[in-house]
């Protein structure tokens, strides 16, 4: 049901492009193979993600992001599912400042059970763009549905720098403060990423992120590197095939566990500012992070 809802939102966004001054975004389809050093069980994932950006002549910017992932585990009679939808609306000023707000919804569950656990987020955002630098900040809150008695306060800083026409660096720091019954803990997400185009047809991308839970002494490190190849001449339309290798390491109290993921993706850039970077890559989770450390950590790792 959540996947159908995401698809409907994506379809509704398309007519608005006719009135937009500028349209960009992309769609990524992906298949992944996941291997853990603690278990020989085969795990696979399939996902589809879309991002649609509209810039209007009156200064209004609208961004819609949707995604769904399905994780299958060998010999397990059910699949793990995740669905995401986000809407950002901002006003772009002549001095480079942008002010706006956002709403997001992340749902996780099991395909044989109709009830999901949903994290609903909302907040305010601001940004500043000058020359080759793009800065952003946001503050917000999250609630769970059904309510499990946890209040989440979100904060984030983002930055991108276009060092050259074919080279972009970026970083993000996000923090989520979880409160329940007078107790609280912090979940932080820190990442750096870069993309580099060797030629018009070949692009490399990579990123490193660390997610930490303060009082539990838990760190989740994810490193992902990949290559993309432009298939436009063969396919007859803009499309990029990509291969990414990622390793996620869970560390807690001297215990380490590694999970390796190999992702094959197909990305279709859209509009004047379409991107060939896979939306579900580690690099994209840092260059275009979600509004919350919990959401960003899950996106980066899976």
Image (tube, rainbow, N blue to C red):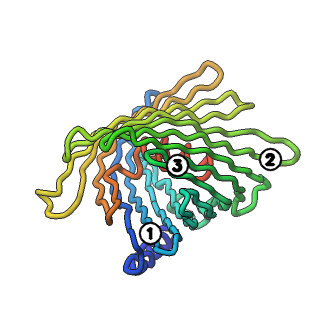
Q: Is residue 205 above or below residue 218?
A: below
Q: Residue at x 35, y 60 (%)?
A: 273
- Quadrant of residue 124 in the image? bottom right
Q: In this view, does 134 lie to the left or right of 49?
A: right
Report the residue at 52% width, 31% height from top. 221
Residue 41 appears anywhere in the view: no
Looking at the image, is mark 2 or mark 3 earlier in the sequence? 2
Tell me the CA gap for discs 1 and 3: 18 Å
Residue 54: mark: 1
**What label sits on residue 179 in the rendered view?**
2
Q: Residue 187 carries which label?
A: none
**How crowded is the residue under tag 1: few (<14 C-alpha within 10 Å), some, or many (20+)?**
many
The image position of residue 60, as x and y in percent, is: 53, 71
Q: Is residue 243 among what the camera can see?
A: yes
Q: On the rendered structure, is 21 left or right of 250? A: left
Closer-to-camera residue (268/1): 268
Question: Furthest-left residue in view?
Answer: 234
Residues at marks 2 and 3, CA–CA distance in whole angstroms = 23 Å
- x and y percentages locating residue 48 in the rendered image: 38, 59
Residue 41 x, y percent position in the rendering:
41, 37
Q: Residues within 10 Å of mark 2 (few under 14, many from 20)?
A: some
Label 3 secondary element: loop
User: Which of the two discs, 2 and 1, sits closer to the camera?
Assistant: 1
Q: Distance between the residues labelled 2 and 1?
A: 36 Å
Residue that numbered label 3 is attached to: 289
The image position of residue 104, as x and y in percent, is: 59, 62
What residue lies at 43% left-to-right and 36% top-to-bottom? Answer: 207
Q: How many labels does the image show?
A: 3
Nearer to us in this view, 52 or 302? 52
Q: Is residue 203 above or below residue 126?
A: above
Q: Is residue 278 left or right of residue 55?
A: left
């Amino acid at each position: 049901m959540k996947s159908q809802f995401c698809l409907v939102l994506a379809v509704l966004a398309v007519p608005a492009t006719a009135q937009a001054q500028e349209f960009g975004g992309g769609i990524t389809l992906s298949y992944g193979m996941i291997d853990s050093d603690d278990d020989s069980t085969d795990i696979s994932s399939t996902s589809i993600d879309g991002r649609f950006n509209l810039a209007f002549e009156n200064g209004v910017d609208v961004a819609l992001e949707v995604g769904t992932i399905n994780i299958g585990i060998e010999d397990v009679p059910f699949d793990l599912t995740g669905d995401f939808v986000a809407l950002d609306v901002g006003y772009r000023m002549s001095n480079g400042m942008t002010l706006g707000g956002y709403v997001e919804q992340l749902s996780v569950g099991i395909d044989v059970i109709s009830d999901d656990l949903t994290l609903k987020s909302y907040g305010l955002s601001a940004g500043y763009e000058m020359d080759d630098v793009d800065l952003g900040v946001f503050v917000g809150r999250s609630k769970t549905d059904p309510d499990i008695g946890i209040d989440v306060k979100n904060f984030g800083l983002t930055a991108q720098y276009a060092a050259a026409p074919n080279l972009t660096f970026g970083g993000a720091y996000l923090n989520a403060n979880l409160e329940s019954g007078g107790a609280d803990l912090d979940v932080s997400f820190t990442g750096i990423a870069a993309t580099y185009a060797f030629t018009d047809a070949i692009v490399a991308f990579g990123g490193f992120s660390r997610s930490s839970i303060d009082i539990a002494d838990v760190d989740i490190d994810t490193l992902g590197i990949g290559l993309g190849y432009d298939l436009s001449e063969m396919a007859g339309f803009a499309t990029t095939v990509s291969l990414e290798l990622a390793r996620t390491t869970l560390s807690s109290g001297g215990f380490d566990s590694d999970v390796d993921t190999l992702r094959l993706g197909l990305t279709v850039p859209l509009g004047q500012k379409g991107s060939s970077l896979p939306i579900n890559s580690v690099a994209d989770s840092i260059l275009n992070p979600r509004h919350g450390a919990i959401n960003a950590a899950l996106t980066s790792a899976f």
